[in-house]
Amino acid sequence: MDKFTTLTGVAAPLPITNIDTDMIIPKQYLKTIARTGLGVGLFSEMRYNEDGSENPDFILNKPAYRKAQIIVAEDNFGCGSSREHAPWALADYGIKCVISTSFADIFRNNSFQNGVLPAIVSKEDLAKLMDDASRGANATLTIDLEAQEIRGPDGGVVKFQIDPFRKHCMLNGLDDIGITLQKKPTIESYETKLAQERPWS
């Protein structure tokens, strides 16, 4: 997993409450277990018309937001089913951070495992960031994970919440497998000792 330290990118506003995982990546995209290629299906029911053409009114189809790396959304982002395809789709599209007042637990944990930062802010600060994100080509935010700060285009600073352990993992590019591999010498030592003490096992 790539390290997450500081990100500066365009932020797309999604002023919708309870964006669930089916909205993020609809069920027809769940046939694959590959983490790549799902970006095309991100928010597909909102991004595309019934004939497959782009919906020009959807935020990510607007020229200023096509390269967005940050989403600013309302409360309870990622609720619904526990599909890990949701953060896979976000990451594959290029979204590296979602800012909201709250996240569904499973989605939040899956996001950390896939290098997508779920940043929790207050309702008052979300309103400021939603306004910043509504500025089109000028909707650039800087996410500083070490300082736990979000800096707006006018120099305003907003603090966000993150679990200290998850912060450490993201700063160092560690998912659960990476954390386990840090203990590899200890694991190998234990396995060697066990083989000597119990050669029949």
Image (cartoon, grey):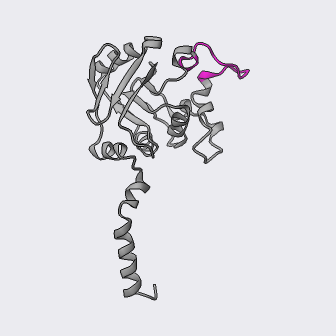
Q: Is residue 28 left or right of residue 139?
A: right
The picture places residue 40, in percent across and down from the top left corner, at 62, 31
| Start-end of magenta stretch | 46-61
In the picture shown, does residue 70 fall above or below 188?
above
Q: Is residue 3 left or right of residue 62?
A: left
Residue in view at x 37 percent, y 43 percent:
170
Residue in view at x 52 percent, y 34 percent:
90
Q: Main secondary structure of the magenta part?
A: loop
Residue in view at x 31 percent, y 42 percent:
167
The picture places residue 190, in percent across and down from the top left corner, at 36, 75
The picture places residue 192, in percent across and down from the top left corner, at 39, 79
In the picture shown, does residue 189 fall above or below 22?
below
The C terminus is located in which quarter? Answer: bottom left
Indicate whether residue 100 is drawn in magenta.
Answer: no
Front-lying residue, 112 or 10: 10
The picture places residue 149, in percent across and down from the top left corner, at 28, 28
Front-lying residue, 182 or 102: 182
| Number of numbered callouts drawn | 0
